[in-house]
Amino acid sequence: MKEISPFCRRIALGGLLQGYFHNLRGTIQGISLELQMLLMKKENCENPEAYEKVNKAFTLLQKLQNQIDTAFDDIYNEKTGPWDLKKFVEKEILFWEAFLPFKHKVKKEIIEEEKVFVELPYNLLRGLFCNLCQELFLNLKENTTLKIFIKKDKRVEFFWDKEIDSSVYENVKKLAQIFKKLANIVVDKGFLSIQFFKI
């Protein structure tokens, strides 16, 4: 039996997300109910410090619920746009800045040469960027300058000034084959280009 490629595993994981979100929502609702019951207990109302701590935990839980709902909506968003390519890239960068070396040790600049819109199902566009950015952003070295150009003809170009591991280039080439119906993806030393096809 052939080994499943890491890209197939990554794609297959997406199929499990609905179940994961369902379970997370159930757990959060259970904790939320317990906290509400604690807030209603007379002894906690008479203890301002305890009441404040339980109320703060309840507020954080509600924030987590909102974040999960937003992520779920993103994953199952079938709208086709048009999507502002610069805003889409900015959102992707914010997402990957959860990886602190990328946030603090890579200088990032986006140059929009022309306003560009892409019409694709949201989850396909997000999947393309998510896979490519995972390969690139998580492997950039400290003190790298990353420049991203939004160009006419529905093209995004990434340039970085410190060499990365050669395996990243090979992985991006494999991804280019997976996404070849959506975009022409070209990678070379210090350079990645994504040109979306007109639909």
Image: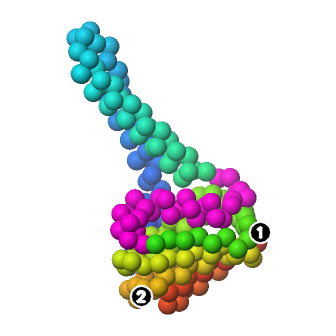
Q: Is residue 124 visible?
A: no
Segment tinted magenta in the rendering: 78-106
Q: Dot 1 surroundings within 10 Å: few (below 14), some, or many (20 or more)?
A: few
| Depicted 42 relative to depicted 174: above or below | above
Question: Decide: marks 1, 2 in contact (CB < 8 A)?
Answer: no
- The residues tagged by marks 1 and 2 sit, at their Cα atoms, a distance apart of 35 Å
Quarter of the image holding residue 140? bottom left
Q: What colour scheme has been applied to the protein in the rendered image?
A: rainbow
Q: Which residue is mark 1?
A: 199
Amino acid at pointer 1: Ile
Dot 2 lies on which element? loop
Q: Is residue 135 left or right of residue 115?
A: left
Q: Is residue 163 visible?
A: yes
Q: Nearer the viewer, mark 1 or mark 2?
A: 2
Q: Which residue is mark 2?
A: 163
> Residue 25 in the image: x percent, y percent?
41, 37
Amino acid at pointer 2: Glu
> Residue 61 in the image: x percent, y percent?
37, 34
Kindly identify which numbered label has been placed on residue 78: none
How many numbered marks appear? 2
Quarter of the image holding residue 177? bottom right
